[in-house]
Every structure is written in structure tokens, then in C-alpha cells.
Image: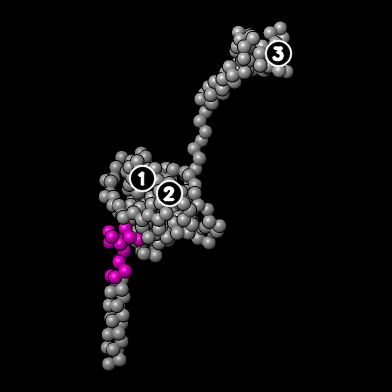
Amino acid sequence: MKGSLGGGYSKEEPPPKHEGKESTEQLKELTTGIQQNLGESILYLWVEKIREVLVEKAQSSDPEPDIKKTSEEIDEGDGDDFVLDCQPIHEDPIKMLNYLTSESQEVDEELPPIHHGKPITDRRSTFQAHLAPVVTPRQVKRVLEKLYENKKIASASHNIYAYRIYCEDKQTFLQDCEDDGETAAGGRLLHLMQILNAHNVLVVVSRWYGGILLGPDRFKHINNCARNVLVEYNYVPSAEESSKQAGKSKKTRKDNKKRTEH
């Protein structure tokens, strides 16, 4: 193509009017390029100019809002029959705790020790639990912030967590959970902690997605990681200890029954 664009305008023909100063200036630049290269192939130059304009416009525009993290796996009915399914207020797990902790508080509580469980790997997905003793929501926030300083943990596909704090004065539990995009996982984790009667503790389970869908097995791995680290750090009795305690209780009941009969 030489001199003009088919169906367009030539040197003698004025360009059509466009609304907006920016559009007029861009059109003038394109027209000048055509006039300066009469008799030559100008299609490539014209395309390049348009590309530059589009790039500049994209760079000057406002960035798009962050997209909320979602699970790579969607199971039909996930969480529908699960009472403790978490519905976080914020996309950022840490920001949610700002509703419970005041940034203006002068007392900065000590960071609790953080323990890491043994990872579980299945079909290239890896799960690892992290545990910390907590007695206030502010400590929960501090632990989460500290964990997110670790680049590997911060880069996990999901960081699911749940915590339970026993309030002795009110004899109630302060508890909450976060799915972090893995639908119903936080609620299932909190439900596990309730069954095990684990309290004054925060459990975070990181999942690094390996590209292969695991289906319901992912929930099994999340809970197994959590259970293992709770047992390891004595927040719940092990299976062996539980059976021993059950045996002792059974023996005690038999002895009491004998005494009653005599």
C-alpha cells in the first residue's frame, strides 16, 4: 500500500473531524507519517504508531482492582451443608482482624512462638500447617503478619486459618476462620478444632497448588495437617493417649459399679 490507505484519505483530502483533543492529536501524527512517507510502504509504520498509542494509553490508565483469590477446584455442593462455612468481610485475611483489633492501641503484645508441621504432598500439591498459641485477636493478627513475611508462605495458593480463644471471664469462645479462596476450608478447619476441643491456638494451613485437581481429598489433607500439628504440640491428645484415657475411664466405671453392688 502506497500513499494512502484504501478507502481513507490522501494528501489533498483533510482528515475527518474527531471529538476530543487527544484523538485529534493522534490523528494528526498518523497523517504526518503518511505524508512524510508518500510512495513507500507505510502500513507497518501506521500499525506501529497505533501500537505505541495503545501502550501509552494502557500505562496511563488506572490499574485494575485486585481479583479475589479463588480456588482452582470447585466441587458441586461444597459448603452448602456446612454450617461453619466462612464468609470473610475482606479479601485480605489480615485486614479482617482490624475489626477486632484497634490500630491505636498502645500496648503491642509479644509475638507468640510459631511452629511448623510436616508437609503433606499429593499429586504435586503441598500442604503444610503452622501453629501458634494465642489468647487475643491481636496476637492472631501479629502471627499472620509474621507468616506473610515469609515469601514462600505468602506465595501459597491458599492460606486457610482458624483460631479458638477461650474467654474465662465470659466462659465463651472467641473464634473465627478464613477460607482464603478455598471455599468452606476454613469452616471445616474450625469445626475440626471444635471437635478436638483445641483452644487458645491459631492454626494456618498453606496449600501450594500443583496443577492437578484433588477434589475432596484437599480437605482431608488440610485437616490432617492441622490435626498432626495440634497433636505434636500437645493441644489435643494423640490417638494412643485417647485410647488409654478411654480405657482408664472404662475401668473406673467398672470399679465404681462393683463398689455399689457390694
Q: Amino acid at mark 1?
A: Ile
Crowd rating for badge 1 (residues with CA inside 10 Å; few <14, some 14–19, many 20+): some
Crowd rating for badge 2 (residues with CA inside 10 Å; few <14, some 14–19, many 20+): some
Q: Residue at x 35, y 52 (%)?
A: 128
Q: Is residue 64 above or below residue 188?
A: above
Q: Is 233 part of what is drawn in magenta?
A: yes
Whole-angstrom CA distance, mark 1 to mark 2, is 15 Å
In magenta, the rendered stretch is 226-241
Element marked by disc 1? helix
User: Mark 1, mark 2: which one is toward the viewer?
Assistant: 2
Q: Residue at x 30, y 52 (%)?
A: 116
Say which mark, if any, is on residue 9: 3
Q: Residue at x 30, y 66 (%)?
A: 237
User: What secondary structure predominates along the stretch shown in magenta?
Assistant: helix
Indicate the position of residue 66 as horizontal and vertical percent values: 49, 37
Indicate the position of residue 218 as horizontal and vertical percent values: 44, 56
Q: Amino acid at mark 2?
A: Gly
- The residue identified by callout 1 is 153
Instruction: Check the picture and name the quadrant holding the C terminus.
Output: bottom left
